[in-house]
Image: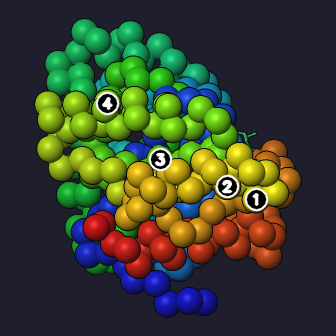
Amino acid sequence: KTSVPLPEQTRIFTVSNQKGGVGKTTTTVNLAAALATTGARVLVIDLDPQGNASTALGVEHRGDVPGIYEALLDGRPLDELMSESPDVDNLWCVPATLDLAGSEVELVSLEHREFRLRQAIAGFLAAHDDPKTFFHYIFIDCPPSLGLLTVNAFVAAREVLIPIQCEYYALEGLSQLITNVNRLAEHLNPDLRLTTILLTMYDGRTRLAQEVAAEVRTHFPSETLETVIPRSVRISEAPSYGQTVISYDPNSTGAVSYREAAVEIAQRGAN
Ligand code: ADP
Ligand code: MG
């Protein structure tokens, strides 16, 4: 095992990109699992009604299972809603159930509607301030839209992690996303910063992937991780076994690259 530093303050990431299918969920669960295997205690909050992160972590998310919906709408503590991942130690998940899809509408009429997740996490951190039960990382897996759920994630997080698929329109979506992050930070969460960009589904044989990667690095030299995540069949297979690639095939290129990305994130700290 590599020795990886643990943060003194809980690092709260929102994994965001308005585009679907760019690797948000895959990045969330695999980085979370990779960090958990280094000894960090990690919580994944599934904020996408699809519940893909819950599935990938092997955590039950049928309609009658309480999940993040109950935290947002009823104020239930995250401790009552999280389950430990069956395959990876130190890793917990608050699942998303389908009723979360209706919550965008239901949240609109509530007080402090943008701050619901932030309040839930504040309660969680307060309940885990003992060194033995302290959580080092929280990852929020966002749906592919800028609705109230994503706004809640931006308000609750301190760091934005953007996975970028190395393809033609990647940069176009990126500037729009960054405008949104800045606007939101200005109004609702001054602590929010874009700290991390991860290039995913990278196919180094194509010139396009190389060009997109080079351009992202030019614009975001300090945010973009050195590690790139290659396209890998093992990564895409793992969720159907209710596993991350970290436990499904630890020696595959996908698992190795997500572990390297996790080490980089830990070593860079929040800056
Ligand atoms: P998002 O959460 O942004 O919608 P996902 O993480 O669900 O995106 O990824 C979209 C699809 O691409 C999924 O089927 C996933 O298994 C697949 N995928 C993600 N990353 C990789 C990768 N590095 N190699 C191969 N397939 C991948
Ligand atoms: Mg997803």
User: What sort of colour scheme is used for the picture?
Assistant: rainbow
> Tag 1's secondary structure?
loop
Snapshot quadrant of residue 257? bottom right
The 10 Å Cα crowd at callout 1, few under 14, some 14 to 19, many 20 or more, is some
Looking at the image, in which quadrant does ligand 1 appear?
top right
The amino acid type, in three-letter code, at marker 4 is: Asn
Determine whether, in the image, residue 155 is placed left or right of residue 248: left
Sooner in the amino-acid sequence: mark 4 or mark 3: 3
- Residue of label 1: 204
Q: Which mark is residue 180?
A: 4
Instruction: Indicate which label's residue lies in the foreground, 3 or 1.
Output: 1
* Camera-nearest residue between 143 and 195: 195
* Viewer can see residue 130: yes
Sooner in the amino-acid sequence: mark 4 or mark 1: 4
Check the picture and name the quadrant holding the C terminus: bottom left
Separation of residues labelled 2 and 1 (CA atoms): 6 Å
The amino acid type, in three-letter code, at marker 2 is: Gln
